[in-house]
Image: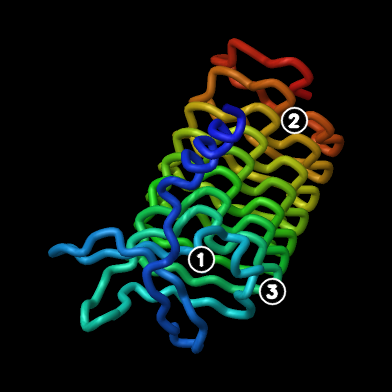
Amino acid sequence: MKKLLLVLIFISFGYGLKAHDFAVMNSEGKLIYYNICSNTASYSVMVTYKGISPWDYNGEYSGIINIPSTVTFNSITYSVDSINESCFDNCPAMILLNIPNSVKSIGRNAFNACHGLVSVNLPDSITSIKDNTFSWCKSLTSINIPNSVTSIGNSVFYGDSSLTSISLPTSLRTVGQSVFCNCVSLTSIILPDSLESIGMSIFENCINLSSVNIPSSLNSIPDYAFRECANIGSMIIPNNITYIGGWAF
């Protein structure tokens, strides 16, 4: 029975795993891997990792990576409309990434632990940034979030120790927990008036953060929001804030 159970568990976890469908060299002569999402009239693909897991390629991407908006395989031209989760996870030698406007979604952990990543061009076509997308990108100094983005997931910039500035769009509604936690070089940030909620520990251990506004659109400050932010000298709390969490300051 134990052997049968183990086999069933293995099958249940393995079911649905899919290797990349094909690979095509980009303009820099580097192989980019794809999964076919639609093979009908729309003909779309997702940028993915080599093999059936992100650990198969061992961070093979380096330097500048340009993702094309279209790719041709077997005489069919596909639109590149998404980036798979963990697609570029742990590519420490990648320094610059250009994402085309054809891409509408980026999976969680897509660029996690890309320690050498200095710059990313995000397209106006995406509406959300998923969990851990840019966590532990220790060389990332700044990033512009396009006006199309309405939500930022958990721990998106966690541990980005070189991040000094970030532009948040006026379209932004929600920001998850620990998004800027341990961003020790971040000195100031402007939260837009469109913001409806922020997650716990959002700025925890941002030890050089000295200036931050609390928009009147918020009604609460969550737990640990500004814990260990020792350089904040003053802050105006709007009258509509009805709740301040534990260890918030």
Mark 1 vs 2, N-terminal side: 1
Residue beneath label 2, please?
226
Q: Residues within 10 Å of mark 2 (few under 14, many from 20)?
A: many
For the residue pair 32 and 111, the one nearer the viewer reads as 32
For the residue pair 178 and 216, the one nearer the viewer reads as 178
Mark 3 vs 1, N-terminal side: 1
Helix, strand or loop at label 3? It is loop
For the residue pair 130 and 183, the one nearer the viewer reads as 130
Task: Give the foreground label among 1 and 2.
Answer: 1
At a point 72% along the width and 40% down the height, the residue shown is 181
CA distance for labels 3 and 2: 32 Å
Check if mark 3's residue and mark 1's residue have beta carbons within 8 Å: no
Helix, strand or loop at label 1? It is loop
Q: Position of residue 238 (x, y in %)?
A: 60, 20
Q: Position of residue 58 (x, y in %)?
A: 66, 68
Q: Does 8 sit left or right of 111 as displayed?
A: left
Helix, strand or loop at label 2? It is loop
Residue beneath label 3, please?
93
Q: Which amino acid does the dot numbered 1 rest on?
A: Gly
Task: Give the foreground label among 3 and 1.
Answer: 1
Q: Position of residue 149 (x, y in %)?
A: 42, 47
Q: Does 123 sit left or right of 7 as displayed?
A: left
CA distance for labels 3 and 1: 20 Å
Mark 3 vs 2, N-terminal side: 3
Q: Quadrant of residue 143?
A: bottom right
Q: Which amino acid does the dot numbered 2 rest on?
A: Phe
Residue beneath label 1, please?
51
